[in-house]
Amino acid sequence: MAGLLTNVLILLPVFQTICLGFRSPLSVFKRYKDTARSLPSGCLASNRPVISLGLSDFALDIRMPGVTPKQSDTYLCMSVPLPVDDEAYVVDFKPYASMDTVHHMLLFGCSEPSSTENYWDCDEGTCKDKSNILYAWARNAASTRLPKGVGFRVGGETGAKFFVLQVHYGDIGAFRDKHKDCSGVTLHLTHQKQPLIAGMYLMMSVNTVIPPGEKVVNADIACRYKRFPMHLFAYRVHTHRLGKVVSGYRVRNGQWTLIGRQSPQLPQAFYPVGHPVDVSYDDILAARCVFSGEGRTTETHIGGTANDEMCNFYVMYYMEAKHAVSYMTCTQNANPEMFRTIPQEANIPVPVTSDMLKMAHGHHEETKDTDKSSLLQQAKNEGEEILDQDFHIEEAVEWPGLDLKLGQVSGLALDPENNLVVFHRGDHVWDESSFDSNFVYQQRGLGPIEQNTILVLNPSNAKLLRSLGKSLFYLPHGLSIDKNGNYWVTDVALHQVFKLGPDEKEPLLILGVALQPGSDKNHFCQPTDVAVDPITGSIYVSDGYCNSRIVQFSSNGLYLMQWGEGTGTTSGRGRPGQFLIPHSLTLIPDFRQLCVADRENGRIQCFRLETGEFIKEIKHKSFGRELFAVSYVPGGFLFAVNGMPYPGEVEPVQGFVMNFSTGEIIDSFIPLRKNFQMPHDVVASEDKTVFIGDVHARAVWKFGSTEKLEHRSVKKAGIEVQETKESESTVEARSQLESNPASTDPLKKQEKQHLVHQNSTGVSFLLITALLIIPVIVLMAILMYIQWRKTTVSGADGEHKLDSSSRRILGRLRGKASSGLNLGNFFASHKGYSRKGFDRLSTEGSDQEKDEDDGSDSEEECSAPPPPPAPSSS
């Protein structure tokens, strides 16, 4: 029996090693706990700096270990090792600090910190190798959550092995009571592979001088971008006391597109970019900080003390994983002349109300309870959109929309009661003989459509509720419904726009002249769609097939303005504000934008409602050459449909779901019954029910979200979850086969992987439990066999072999430290900047080097698409 006990003790390390092989946060963090420093009570909300948040997620608490700075403008650093060896992704940052104590915090990622002490003066540096900024905080900023499918990559072969926290303590008066500070940040990390990799682009001025008493001083920064495309999703501004406003822009072909602008006197959080901004090869990134020297008696320079100044504009971006660069900087003004055309808004201070100042000077109470629920709570930033993207769109096969007796379905809308309204052409057809070369309708002799062209249907069963529009229209096209339930329609044959009450037989308002195409204030030429602003009542008309413009009217029909011009004969290459058939409109009231399906350019363009200023473009290869319609749903979702592929092209005709803020495709969908022929319009409700009208199929498809089914499935037992998963996988396979089998959209893949992971949670738990039990049984069998052998043969040799095997397995789990290059102080490396503030390595841009990978490889340039054939009419 004693021999059996000895063997158990010998095999125990082997069994522990096997268990550690399973990627469970509760097990792989053992190495971290063994090496973690002991911290004063109160610094960590618990004794567990690493907290499991599930099978693949965990939280890492990074706090200063109870420090008391001795003088103002002290910079202290501390490091925390990444608690796992394999690759992980940071997806959320939650700060714990107050501006009454801390001036700012920076979080770096690196391979080896500059010191192994509990904490150290940042004069010694932050990292021995090149350091990357992952996060920045100041002035009581709120938390920062990354978009779905985006994460900062750490660990693995190339990612950071350590986090280094740098804290700038400004006024020493906050420590008169000699208290110990525990400021820091909690990270949410996941092992789930993120398809898009986040990075930080820092623009900062190093040579600005602010003369005393000077009312306005501009600090300008600009660099030309020479890398693969990146997508900007958040920005942060930073100055000290003299800063009034900081603005950042992308400059392309001389056009300035705003990334973000903010007062640096407000909480210096990472604010979401109001509209997605992509940056491509050879674009210019530019920023301006506006200062005032009023009240100062001496010059103010860039530096790290409270009396110095800074000009920083941070941008968080994401890139495709294979091209990802984690950190880039810009510290120069490549072209001072270009700032003559900077938008005037860059010099207009952002109003700061007393309420905002109270928020900026409020205290952040440190959370004492770091249990799983508190770590998962996330405050929504000002204007931040938290999108629930865990869903998939599938056809509602019970919907009888394919059996409706309809003409060519041209328009769809939902009324205030959420009923479906269909606009169709009855017995009229738009074909090649409908118009002459001057766009004059050639079939007037047929008279108007004698059927009711506007049908109100029950969205659940397609039952007809009411109908109207008889003998009013020749060739219906676009339909929208305002907040009062009025129908707004366009007729491409009449070249007119109509407003009809829900119970009226005669139009309440008519815009345009019947049967007369034109391009002035009183005429349209085949207008395609109309949208009405729910706040101002302004009317927006997309005009249309033979005009390439958006026309705005007042609520009573008075012409106000127009914008847009023709692209020409080549589609897919239009500049901002150019159209080749502006085919569909959707309003985004939350952001005061109007988005246009620019059909033959295969893209969505969005504009500011009040001015018509171009804001952004959303364009994907999977759209193909045509994008017919677009619809917005409150909560941040865009729905769209494309056209049939041209000969030789592979992009299928399908529907799309997109994140409005990022422009990325979340999901795509096709019918399970029959096929799309020419989907012409799309409308979606807030519960993600989608209707698509098809001109050629003369049908209306209904699609629904599977997220409700998913939520029910998660609550069921493991075997039931597995059955739901298999059912959904079958549907997914059908969708994949009928659409594009080579689809590589990263966010879509991530969502599907996440869905499968959720469904299989119960199964995974049972599987892991079984796998843990099996080794125990095997070990017991081995022990019994060994004991038997020892009674018949010598057992010492076997014991020796087991011991050496154990050492080999455990040895493989031990990580090796990464070495790196020793880099100097970024600011001190610039000639003429060895002032005290920089000598201390103490600015927000401290310890930052010029991007060593700043190459300009020619192969990074994006190729232009080939010219398409002439557009078709419908």
Image (cartoon, rainbow, N blue to C red):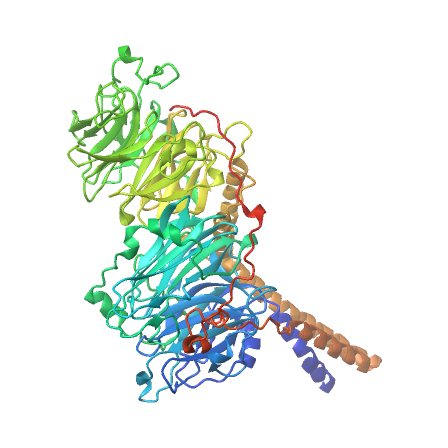
Q: Position of residue 695 (x, y in %)?
A: 38, 26
Left or right placement of residue 702 versus residue 859 in this view: left
Q: Looking at the image, which residue is at 31% across and 32% down?
A: 549
Q: Is residue 294 left or right of residue 826?
A: left
Judge from the rendering whether residue 831 lies leftward or rightward of residue 582; answer left or right: right
Front one among 654 and 606? 606
Measured as percent of width and height from the top left, residue 379 is found at: 33, 64
Q: Residue furthest right?
A: 793
Looking at the rendered structure, the number of numbered marks drawn on it comes to: 0
Residue visible at 56% across and 59% down? 853
Foreground pick, 189 / 96 = 96
Q: In front: 622, or 170?
A: 170
Task: Identify which residue, 254 or 724, lies in the foreground.
Answer: 254
Residue 49, position in %: x, y? 47, 76
**Residue 328 location, x and y as percent?**
49, 60
Q: Is there any visible trace of residue 373 in the rendered image?
A: no
The quarter holding residue 137 reads: bottom left
Q: Residue at x 38, y 57 (%)?
A: 287
Q: Quadrant of the N terminus?
A: bottom right
Q: Relative to 139, is 429 above or below?
A: above
In the figure, residue 430 lies in which quadrant? top left
Can I make out residue 249 in this image? yes
Taking the view exactly as shown, the residue that stands out farthest to the top is: 445
Asked whether, in this view, residue 676 is left or right of residue 171, the answer is right
Q: Quadrant of the C terminus?
A: top left
Task: State whether residue 713 is above or below residue 358.
Answer: above
